[in-house]
Image (spheres, helix red, strand yellow):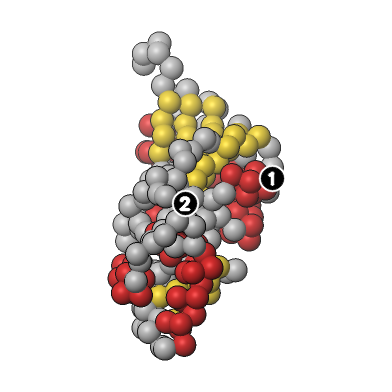
Amino acid sequence: MTDIPVSVITNGSLLYLPEVRESLMRADLVIPSLDAGDAALFEYVNRPHKNIIFERMAEGIVEFASQYTGRLWMEVLLVSGVTGLPSEVKKIAAWVEKIRPEKVQLGTVNRPAYEDFACAVDPKQMKKLAGLFAGEVEILASDPPAVSPPDAASDATDADILNLLARRPCTLEGVALGLNLHPHEAAKRLEKLLKNGRIATLRSGSAVFYKLPGESLV
């Protein structure tokens, strides 16, 4: 091994395999990620390969942590209105408590994101959510949203909202940020589309998602 310190950033999906855990034992620092606290939101946010099973992956990280003697951090990425809710963060924190890392690096998405539903958590809310973790939490700096202010004029139409929801279910905030609409305007548009039967809602925990009729959350 080199004298240069080695750090490994991993999504942790294969840490349930003994040979993978063994290969990381000589690293100086390992940083697995855990972006959801249950299988449903893990599949929604991370879009994993069909062979990656949430419980097995999370237990693999726990098992690795119990064997590893180097420095271990956890990276958690939150999405507004999805995993960036207190109820969902508590689920993630429960897993982190089992893993017992040296610290948690807590971040949120930067705009523009690949997925339209992926919106950044407000900095003040990030501080509140950080308090749900036991131990040290480092809130990672994020770039300002790469979109104009949400109260700016927007040419978004109802068709744009439907096109957005055809790609992925979104929360109210996701629609507002994705189409540069003021939240109040987005709420009025969504309410009208709901009354006309052109969209439907689906609840996941305390989050309400807007979607096209007949579409599922995942």
Q: Quadrant of residue 4?
A: top left
Please state the horizontal and vertical placement of residue 49, each as a whole percent of the image.
31, 57
Tag nearer the camera, 2 or 1: 2
Please state the horizontal and vertical placement of residue 199, each as a whole percent of the image.
40, 81
Q: Secondary structure at mark 1?
A: loop
Q: Which residue is mark 2?
A: 149
Callout 2 environment at 10 Å: few (<14), some (14 to 19), or many (20+)? few
Q: Which residue is mark 1?
A: 131
Q: Quadrant of the C terminus?
A: bottom left
Residue 49 left/right relative to 141: left
The amino acid type of the residue labelled 1 equals Gly
**x 49%, y 46%: residue:** 108
Q: Earlier in the sequence, mark 2 or mark 1?
A: 1
Q: Is residue 16 above or below residue 31?
A: below
Callout 1 environment at 10 Å: few (<14), some (14 to 19), or many (20+)? few
What is the CA distance from the residue labelled 2 to the residue labelled 1?
Answer: 28 Å
Q: Nearer the viewer, residue 162 or 78?
A: 162
Q: Secondary structure at mark 2?
A: loop
Furthest residue in direction top, as rendered: 3
**x 53%, y 68%: residue:** 184
Please state the horizontal and vertical placement of residue 116, each as a whole percent of the image.
37, 59
